[in-house]
Amino acid sequence: MDLNKAVAEVDSMLDREISYRGAGGVEELLASLKARARLDTCIGSIEETTYSLRRKQRRLSDLPPLDVVRWAQTVLCMPNLVFLELDTTGLYQEAKIIRVTVLDGVGACLLDLFARTSNPIPQNIERITGITNQDLQSKGQDIISVLGQLQEVLTGKYVLSYNLDFDTEKLQEAAARLEIEPTHFIGEDLMLQATRYFVTQRYPRLETVCQQIGKPLPAQPGQISIDRAKGQIALIHAIANAVTTAQPATTPPVDIDNNDDDLDEHPF
């Protein structure tokens, strides 16, 4: 259907019928009845075409919000930007911090420390974090020393972290156990911005979004905190450049909303 032509025809017919002031005889009445029947048919066809277009429109993929793109562009201009990664013995309340990593805005490592634990870490945590018990035994420092050095590095910095609430909570719990002042810093949660950017109803895993933008993280157990911090950097650059997928247009993107694997594990 030529929609423009159909609309113009209907508009013209409506003008004629609107100006109609009553039948001047049977012939005029029949002509008007015929015209109005045709109007119903034509308008119905236009509605069907419009409905079909609306259905097609609903198949359009979501576009990222422009304000998130502008946010990423602005944050990347900050000279004191850093990226934080924490590894812990789990997600439970008493989970201990076992590694702290901080990269600057271009990916240079400012801090990468292991923290000793009183008990060996389980195999699933070794797999998720890429940390072995041997690493903790040979390289681990007292957690109070680790937290002190972390505070020094984060002072005056703007911190991005993927699931910042989790990191903040674990830092506060560690400080409470040690009865020391908690780590202070300012920053934002990159995961929340990624959730808005990819227009998803669930918090996307860092590993998933990095795969989607064409910057996949190493496979576990070879994936360590430095890799995830670099993944954060790749992600914010993708957001700043309005990149949502590195895949060809004919390839379905990674389904961020339907990733049910390891829901009880870390968000990376």
Image (cartoon, grey):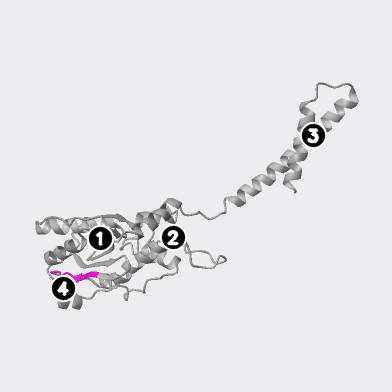
Viewer-closest of 233 and 205: 233
What amino acid type should be assigned to the residue bearing mark 3? Ala
Separation of residues labelled 3 and 2 (CA atoms): 50 Å
Q: Quadrant of residue 260?
A: bottom left
**Residue designated by label 2:** 256
Lateral position of residue 117 relative to residue 44, left or right:
left
Separation of residues labelled 3 and 4 (CA atoms): 85 Å
Lateral position of residue 137 relative to residue 157, left or right:
left
x, y percentage for residue 268? 33, 64
Question: At 69% from the left edge and 44% from the top edge, which residue is drawn?
Answer: 48
Neighbourhood count class around disc 1 (C-alpha, 10 Å): few under 14, some 14–19, many 20 upward: few
What amino acid type should be assigned to the residue bearing mark 2? Ile
> Which residues are the magenta region?
110-118
Label 1 vs 4, first from the N-terminus: 1
Neighbourhood count class around disc 2 (C-alpha, 10 Å): few under 14, some 14–19, many 20 upward: some
Q: Secondary structure at mark 1?
A: loop
What amino acid type should be assigned to the residue bearing mark 1? Leu
**Residue designated by label 4:** 140
**Res 37 label:** 3
x, y percentage for residue 210? 40, 66
Query: How many callouts does the rendering have?
Result: 4
x, y percentage for residue 51? 65, 45
Separation of residues labelled 1 and 3 (CA atoms): 69 Å
What amino acid type should be assigned to the residue bearing mark 4? Gly
Separation of residues labelled 2 and 4 (CA atoms): 36 Å
Q: Nearer the viewer, mark 2 or mark 4?
A: 4
Q: Is residue 46 magenta?
A: no
Neighbourhood count class around disc 4 (C-alpha, 10 Å): few under 14, some 14–19, many 20 upward: some
**Residue designated by label 1:** 91
Q: Is residue 113 above or below residue 28?
A: below
